[in-house]
Amino acid sequence: MRCFFSFLCMVITVLLIAGCNVEEENLDGYSNYFMTFKVDGSIVEFRNTGVGGVANGPIYNSRVHSFALSGTKFIYSQEESDLFFLSFIQESPELELNHDYVIDYTSITGDYENEILDRAIALVGFITYYIDPNGVQFTAIPIHDFEYFNRQTGYSVKFTSISSDAVEGMFSAILYNQELDKLVNITEGKFRLVNVLNRN
């Protein structure tokens, strides 16, 4: 698990660097980058220099690779708000276009229940969260949420286009906040983010 958290730190750093580089260059060339979605029906939009990117990398001492995409409204904000982060792991180092990556309790335990190491990776290797404008974090860690809180969380993502500059796709999620004991639905998610794949 420590290896995966190290990877997460690397991914977030890469995504932030990508966003900073965007901000330092001509903004006109980045006007088409975005992440939009609805949270319980309310529209959320991240556009231009605020958005992050899509990154990947191998998890040390395992056979799996991890992928992450991230978007934020204000890249230099000191507030922990207006942020969306999604990650998943798979054996292949390549993304499959137009494939529905569905991550929930059933799909994860079906693949990883027989191996202790793989189950440990699965427990932390599939995580998505959204921090709303008030700083409230809603998270999906499907195995953890089901086994500790009896909550069915999960998410799905489909990548529809990958070019040297950008990755496009769509996503949805059911996220949970333990303190509020509240589930939220993220629907109609769409993104066009900076391509940071294979840059680790």
Image: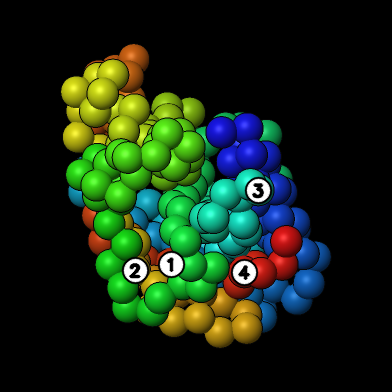
Question: Residue visible at 28% across and 19% down?
Answer: 148
Q: Is residue 35 left or right of residue 18?
A: left
Report how far apart the C-alphas of labels 2 and 4 lie in the structure.
Answer: 16 Å
Report how far apart the C-alphas of labels 2 and 3 lie in the structure.
Answer: 26 Å
- Regarding mark 1 in the picture, which secondary structure is present there? strand
Above or below, 59 against 150 in this view is: below
Q: What residue type is labelled 1?
A: Phe
Q: What residue type is labelled 3?
A: Tyr
Residue 191 shows which numbered tag?
A: 1
Q: Pointer 1 and pointer 2: residues touching (CB < 8 Å)?
A: no
* Furthest residue in direction bottom, as rendered: 163
Above or below, 194 against 132 in this view is: below
Sequence-earlier tag: 1 or 2? 2
Of residues 119 and 107, the one drawn nearer to the viewer in this rendering: 119
Residue 156: x %, y % from top left = 30, 57
- Residue 146 figure quarter: top left
- Pointer 4: what residue? 197
Asked if residue 110 shows in the view, the reply is yes
- Pointer 3: what residue? 60
Q: How crowded is mark 3: few (under 14 residues within 10 Å), some or many (20 or more)?
A: few
Of residues 11 and 143, the one drawn nearer to the viewer in this rendering: 143
Q: Nearer the viewer, mark 3 or mark 1?
A: 3
- Regarding mark 4 in the picture, which secondary structure is present there? loop
- Regarding mark 3 in the picture, which secondary structure is present there? loop
Q: Pointer 2 and pointer 4: residues touching (CB < 8 Å)?
A: no
Q: What residue type is labelled 2?
A: Lys
Residue 45: x %, y % from top left = 42, 57
- Residue 150 figure quarter: top left
Residue 24: x %, y % from top left = 80, 65
Question: Residue visible at 77% across and 64% down?
Answer: 21
Sequence-earlier tag: 3 or 1? 3
Report how far apart the C-alphas of labels 4 and 3 lie in the structure.
Answer: 17 Å
